[in-house]
Image: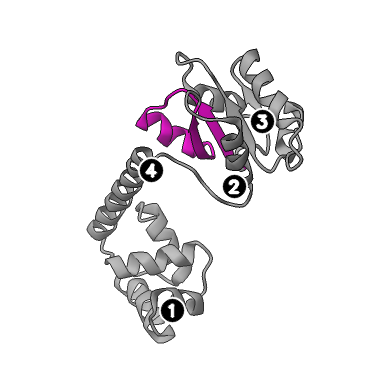
């Protein structure tokens, strides 16, 4: 657990220490945790600063995080999500039971974000994707081609791509071959690299 002040640390520690389903680790063992809790009670603290201070700790970036703070702006939300925050709870209206539930939920792969903040996040992601699609189209790729190359870049094979997009395997192979031939590339690896280079994914 990381806290911006001693009162917040003591408040959370006193509750969580005695919870039968939670094991508290000291900060120096943060990289061994299943979930990290970040708490600040002060409105003047920027929640993103709390996350930034620990982001240099090896192995911490990939661990899901629960943030408890009085308030957060949409811009800060986008930043803290980039640091691994999966749940945000308002310090002024949350109880320790809710924090405990959020920690266990995050450990199971769940998330808790307020509706307005979730909307801001999804709008930002949609905008970024729209931008990458525009770039890709200008560089000679169609939406279907972008999707296939994006999945190849993620490590999916032709069979998996066909299943996910509900295409036949021959259609997927045809899409890949079409990109390779049209852009004068040598193989699918070059096609995937081309898509990444132009910012399609």
Residue 10 showing in the rendered view: yes
Q: CA distance from mark 2 to mark 3?
A: 24 Å
Tags 4 and 2 touching, CB below 8 Å = no
Dots 4, 3 in contact, CB < 8 A: no
Q: Look at mark 4 in the image and give the residue it sits on.
A: 118
The quarter of the image holding the N terminus is top right
Seen at 63% across and 14% down, the residue is: 7
First along the sequence among labels 2 and 1: 2
Mark 1 sits on what residue?
A: 162
User: Mark 3 highlights which residue?
Assistant: 57
Rendered image: mark on residue 105: 2
- Under circle 2, the secondary element is helix
Report how far apart the C-alphas of labels 4 and 3 lie in the structure: 27 Å
Could you give the CA–CA distance between mark 1 and mark 4, rounded to whole angstroms? 31 Å
Q: CA distance from mark 2 to mark 1?
A: 33 Å
Q: Residue 73's x, y, as percent?
A: 37, 27
Above/below status of 158 relative to 80: below
Residue sitting at x 56%, y 37%: 98
Disc 1 to disc 3, C-alpha distance: 40 Å
Mark closer to the observer (4, 3):
4
Q: Is residue 64 magenta?
A: yes
């Amino acid at each position: 657990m990381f806290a911006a002040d001693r009162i917040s640390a003591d408040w959370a520690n006193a509750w969580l220490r005695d919870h039968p389903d939670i094991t508290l680790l000291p900060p120096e063992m943060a990289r061994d945790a299943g979930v990290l809790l970040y708490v600040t009670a002060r409105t003047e603290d920027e929640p993103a600063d709390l996350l930034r201070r620990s982001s240099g700790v090896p192995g911490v970036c990939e661990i899901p995080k629960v943030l408890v703070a009085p308030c957060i702006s949409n811009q800060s939300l986008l930043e803290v999500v980039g640091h691994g925050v999966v749940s945000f709870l308002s310090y002024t209206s949350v109880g320790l039971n809710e924090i405990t539930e959020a920690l266990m939920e995050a450990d199971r792969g769940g998330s808790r974000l307020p509706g307005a903040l979730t909307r801001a996040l999804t709008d930002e992601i949609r905008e970024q994707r729209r931008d990458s699609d525009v770039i890709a189209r200008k560089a000679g790729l169609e939406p279907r081609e972008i999707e296939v190359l994006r999945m190849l870049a993620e490590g999916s094979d032709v069979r998996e791509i066909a299943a996910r997009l509900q295409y036949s395997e021959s259609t997927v192979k045809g899409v890949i071959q079409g990109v390779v031939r049209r852009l004068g590339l040598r193989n699918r690896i070059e096609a995937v690299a081309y898509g990444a280079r132009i910012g399609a994914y």
